Amino acid sequence: MDDNPRKVSALDMEITMLGHYLNDSEKKLLEAAALSCPATRSIHPDIQLIVKFTYQ
């Protein structure tokens, strides 16, 4: 949280995919798509976006 308790300063997300069969190139493509989607881009630039991708 920010110094102001009513203001979000960061979003911490973990995206888990059943992708044990994906190669590194395919994983990078999916991660790039997730990070450039309209919902992700609509987050205010002052909010830190922390994204962790997990493949099972």
Image (cartoon, rainbow, N blue to C red):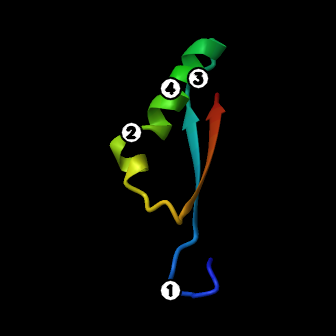
Q: Amino acid at mark 1?
A: Arg
Bin the neighbour count of mark 1 within 10 Å (Cα to Cα): few under 14, some 14-19, many 20 and up: few
Q: CA distance from mark 2 to mark 1?
A: 26 Å
Give the structural element (helix, strand or loop) at label 2. Answer: loop
Give the CA separation, mark 2 to mark 4: 11 Å
In the rendering, at what x and y percent does residue 5 appear?
57, 87
Q: Check disc 3 and report the residue beneath it.
A: 28
Q: Amino acid at mark 3?
A: Lys
Residue 41: x and y, percent?
Answer: 41, 48
Q: Are marks 3 and 1 in contact (CB under 8 Å)?
A: no
Q: Amino acid at mark 4?
A: Leu
Q: Which mark is residue 6?
A: 1
- Residue 22 shows up from this direction: no
Q: Any mark on residue 30, and which?
A: 4
Q: Quadrant of residue 43?
A: bottom left
Point out the tag, 2 or 1, that comes first from the N-terminus: 1
- Residues marked 2 and 1 touching at CB (< 8 Å): no
Do the residues under discs 4 and 3 have CB atoms within 8 angstroms?
Answer: yes
Quadrant of the image containing the N terminus: bottom right
